[in-house]
Image (tube, helix red, strand yellow):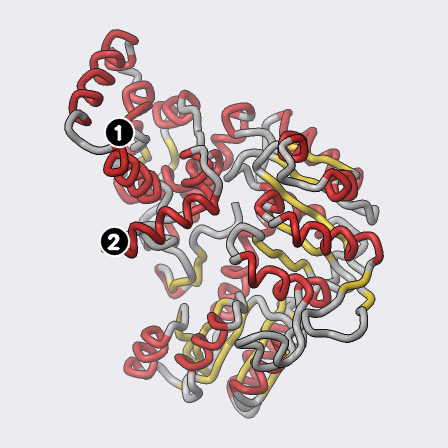
Amino acid sequence: MRLLIIGGMHGQIGAASKMAMARGAKVAHVPDVLAALNALRAGQGADLVMIDVGLDIKGFIASLQAERFSATVVACGVGTDAEAAVNAIRAGAKEYVPLPPEPDLIAAVLEAVTEEAKTLLYADPLMKNVVKLADQVADSNASILVTGESGTGKEVLANYVHSKSRRADRPFISLNCAAIPENLLESELFGHEKGAFTGAVARRIGKFEEANGGTLLLDEISEMHPRLQAKLLRAIQEREIDRVGGTKPVKVDIRIIATSNRDLTAEVANGNFREDLFFRLNVININVPALRDRKGDIPLLADYFAKKYAEVNGVPYRSISEGALEALRRHRWPGNVRELENAIHRAVLLAVGDDIGADAIVLPESTASVAAGGAAGSSATALAQAGRATTNLVGRTVADVERDLIIDTLKHCLGNRTHAANILGISIRTLRNKLKQYTDEGTPVPEPGTGGGGGVGIGSGGAMASAVAGL
């Protein structure tokens, strides 16, 4: 856990720093926003930033977004100044922490950032075999390719492998290759020198250098453009990289883990992925099975999410009834663990009584009747419903139907682009292009986390809790 504190170390911020270090965080301190940005550009890295409420929080967060730094920002200030807290949140901070700090609150802040990435829950024998293989290869330096459908927990497994490796005390750096435009991905990977291109206001260390000594996760590597694949292959083979605009290579010592929700063998055959890079990455292959194939995990995961979202929303924890579990077991889970998480989050909010009953399990219409276990699940009823649905489409253009399908799927996925693309059967790049077109046409597009309670918030009793992140 890397914590960057921005502001004077005198008084209570210094106390917060000591508490964080006592909890195992690696703490760095800088006096102001400019020094913080320079530290991040130099590859220092931060999972959490605590910034003095008196500094320019809005400008700092805008700079983070412009330079594509990913870190949770929490404001802190002396006392419980309501106006300062509101201004900090409006400026973009995830939360406001009053000083002097409380040890439990500091611990909860750290846990909120680190919990999800390190939570690997399993009970099904199929998943136990996966974890056994991960344990067996974790201590090597071999590259690992983690495959599986979107939402199965590939990044969580990658983090688990890192935590079990000899590099566990070194950085674990993740880069989502599908989330960054092609023209910026090279800079994200290898860094750039000042003035290398328009907008390169200072030297920037890339993910390869930031992960030096540790592990670099290349998430959804199948979305990487073939031109960059060649440069990535050289970097992995030679263990050195060239910054954009640089004049000499830089040596790096990293372990590569890549993930993909696509069949890379087929992508190679179709000419979309380099065969030599595939072989270089696929020294060890770990396939994470779909949730429908490891239903023994459903009760454990469902209970975990029920506890988590009860705390997030400040409502009493309710156990999951056997009827609700049966409904969950019958569902096909095309969105895997991520879809299960969303379903339990809804159930926590909808449940009444002493437990979460089957009536609180709201699933997509195509399977809702099956989950309810009623006669509506019969094939005759399903055919009748399909006929009515088709009739309702008559008179509409294909483009209109496609737009509604994409927007409705995105809403169901709480704005998660990767999850929606997987359900729709299209690439994340195609989905982004469609959403840009709809935005240009004036159609509202759900933002990531819509309806899902993303980020970090103060729950009941002042405890800090995190929303959807790792799985």
Give, as a three-letter code, the residue at label 1. Asp
Q: Which mark is residue 359?
A: 1
Kindly identify the amino acid type of the residue bearing the numbered disc 2. Answer: Glu
Up the image or down, 303 lies above or below 35; here it is above
Image location (x, y in percent) of residue 24: 66, 67
| Mark 1 and mark 2: Cα distance apart in space | 38 Å
What residue is shown at x 66% (from left), y 52% (from top)?
Answer: 227
Residue that appears at 60% across and 49% down: 224
Q: Which mark is residue 19?
A: none
Which is nearer the eye, 175 or 399? 399
Q: Residues within 10 Å of mark 1 (few under 14, many from 20)?
A: some
**Label 1 SS:** helix
Q: Disc number at residue 441? A: 2
User: Looking at the image, do the residues carrying marks 1 and 2 touch, with CB atoms under 8 Å apart?
Assistant: no
> Which numbered disc flags the more N-terminal residue, 1 or 2?
1
* Left or right, residue 366 beside residue 331: left
Q: Which marked residue is nearer to the observer: mark 1 or mark 2?
A: 2
* Residue drawn 48% across the image and 31% down it: 299
Q: Is residue 200 visible?
A: yes
When asked about the image quadrant of residue 407, the answer is top left
Mark 2: which secondary structure?
A: loop
